[in-house]
Image (cartoon, helix red, strand yellow):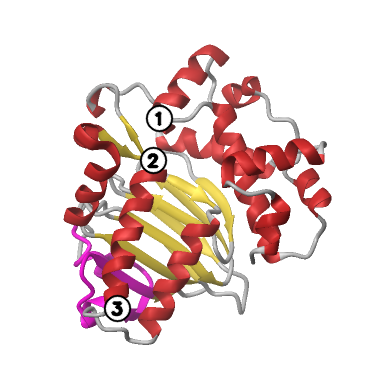
Amino acid sequence: MKTPDRTSAAAYPRHLAGRVVADSAALHWPGLYVRRYQFPRVVDRYLVPATPEPLISCQLKGSAQFRERDVGQSWIVREIRARDLFVTRSKTPYEVAFRSPAGEELEVIQIHIAVDHFLVALKEVHGTNADKAEMIDFFGRDAALADFCFACAELLDARTAGTSKCIADLAKLLATYLAERYTTIASRPSEARGGLPIWQLRKVEDYVSAHLSEEIAVEKLAELVELSPFHFFHVFKETTGMSPLQFVTRERITRAQQLIRETSRSLIEIALDVGYTSPSHFAQVFRRVVGVTPSEFRNAL
């Protein structure tokens, strides 16, 4: 069967290479299409159709060398592991392929948010500009969103019925979180946007993720996508809603949150790992972004 360019969240699983081991459709979850997949160790290139529903894909277990590209573009290669995330509302299909080490096959949870729920969240977040809101494609680490995904996986494994209030609350939470964190207002219709193509944006994201402990200059990021620093600054902000500096700061603090959660390393070591040579400056930026100091964040875990 030929894979269509676009499909619905309801029909999405039939076009993936993975085996569905749990599906919220049988439990009638309102506002969410949640599936847990197991993938073989090696998956050759296949086409992933676009959906009108926003998609969150979170790695639950395993690791892989993952390749992805827009049709006709160059491959983007990533090393993915547990708690890595993809967020997209792609309007076009894209191709993926991956290879896992023996014994580390991927288990993934994928969450589509129903369009009506997402539109309500957009109106609550963006008001009269909701019709101009566009999704920002993302790959990386988002500790809070990963926690929500793992919670979905646990509720799915427990076969929680869709009549449970926590399912409705979780659907609203996920829709609102994406609307707040992963959408931006287009200054003009998307057909006329001059923002970065997805593959260039991801090239910048991957570089930032790999060099968080180093100084990251706007000039270097601009060089990656072959633009002048001035032009890059403006198209990056148009695409993401953030300046390059704001984006780097978000990535550094997100990584710091992950390290605080998952390791017992000192806060000074963590600060150095994410590019802050001054502990006081790290604490200041962390508090501005998260709302608490790194010490308070660790003590609350």
Image height check: is 132 above or below 272?
above
Residues in magenta?
A: 7-36
Label 1's element? helix
Kindly identify which residue carries mark 2: 136
Instruction: Examine the rendering and report whether any part of residue 83 can be seen.
Output: yes
In the displayed structure, does residue 254 sit left or right of residue 144?
right
- Residue 60, horizontal then vertical, whole percent: 51, 71
Marks 1 and 2 sit apart, C-alpha to C-alpha, by 7 Å
Instruction: Work out whether residue 264 or residue 22 is closer to the camera in this orientation and state it.
Output: 264
**Marks 1,2: beta carbons within 8 A:** yes
Image height check: is 9 above or below 275?
below
The three-letter code of the residue at mark 2 reads Ile
Query: Closer to the N terminus: mark 3 or mark 2?
Result: 3
Q: Quadrant of residue 73?
A: top left
Label 2's element? loop
Report crowding for label 2: few under 14, some 14 to 19, many 20 or more residues within 10 A (C-alpha).
many
Image point 54% across, 20% down: which residue? 226
Kindly identify which residue carries mark 1: 239
| Labelled disc at residue 89 | none
The three-letter code of the residue at mark 1 reads Thr
Kindly identify which residue carries mark 3: 23
Image point 44% across, 73% down: which residue? 151
Instruction: Work out whether residue 29 or residue 54 is closer to the camera in this orientation and state it.
Output: 29
- Residue 221, horizontal then vertical, whole percent: 60, 27
**Marks 1,3: beta carbons within 8 A:** no
